[in-house]
Image (cartoon, grey):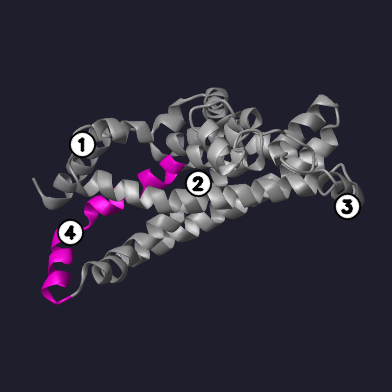
Amino acid sequence: MNTTTTTKFTTFSFRRRSVLPGFGISLGFTIFYASLIVLIPLSAVFIRTTSLSWGEFCDAAFSEFALPAYRVTFLCSFAAALVDAFFGLILAWVLTRYSFPGRRIVDALVDLPFALPTAVTGISLSMVYSKNGWIGSWIEGYLGIQVAYSTLGIFVALTFIGLPFVVRTLQPVMEDLEPEIEEVAATLGASRLQTLFKVIIPQLIPALLTGFALAFARALGEYGSVVFISSNTPKKSQIAPLIIYQQLEQKNYPGATAVATVLLVASFLLLLLINLLQKWSRRHQQ
């Protein structure tokens, strides 16, 4: 059997053993599914928005009620993502580098915000952090700080739902870090703080920024858990998704789509940022 026949036989065998169908069928099914589930519904928002003039769009998207809602949404989401980045880094490090009783339970609890319905999350947090709750009674009684039914309650809910994004983004990177790097740094005379900030942290920054952006993007669209723990006071503790819901209840579809467009554009920008961070992360690791 000559070389050409062997090559043809090998190619034919590889094609027959392939689990997936041909590239054309797979690509066509992928585009069809993505268009049906993602692209068409999202494009409907933009199409509905084009029926508004620029003045009507600005009046609906940046009304006296929408602007405070944007401020609360973006500030609370940003603050919650920062806290998640800090504590998520610590939690991921503990789960990756240490063995202790109950480690698997703690690791499983990290994914709990993914599994819990948002309404259950909101009710649970409001019960715990309310004036008569286990934690809220202590905070409000001794510190005089009201958590539930305030803007601080929004921050607590967004912190809860965003933590898994940071931890799960950091864990694979930490697992790939060789412990020998720390030993070499110690051998060269570096202290623990120098090893942490000059050797370990620089390698974790791309993944940490990606986890921060994912938590921030997730917090922007959170609705179910927030409405239960927030007072939902107009111009004070309302979030942007709640404005959309109220506009839909009032049959004001153009106003709802205008606010939704603002959040959609913000999500697209965050998605672009995440992709750029992932690209930077791959280059950094190479």
- Earlier along the polypeptide chain: callout 4 or callout 3? 3
Gap between marks 3 and 2, in whole Å? 32 Å
The residue pinned by badge 3 equals 54
CA gap, disc 1 to disc 4? 40 Å
Disc assigned to residue 13? 1
Task: Say which residue label 4 marks.
Answer: 178
Question: Which residue is pictured at 46% across the width and 59% down the height?
Answer: 277
**In-image side of 40 versus 180 (left or right):** right
- Going from N to C along the chain, the mark reached first, 4 or 2, is 4
With respect to residue 154, does 2 lie above or below?
below
* SS class, disc 3: helix
Q: Amino acid at mark 3?
A: Trp
Identify the mark at residue 215; answer none if there is no mark.
2
Indicate the amino acid at tag 4: Glu
Figure check: 167 above or below 189? above
Rendered residue at 32%/31% (across/down): 108
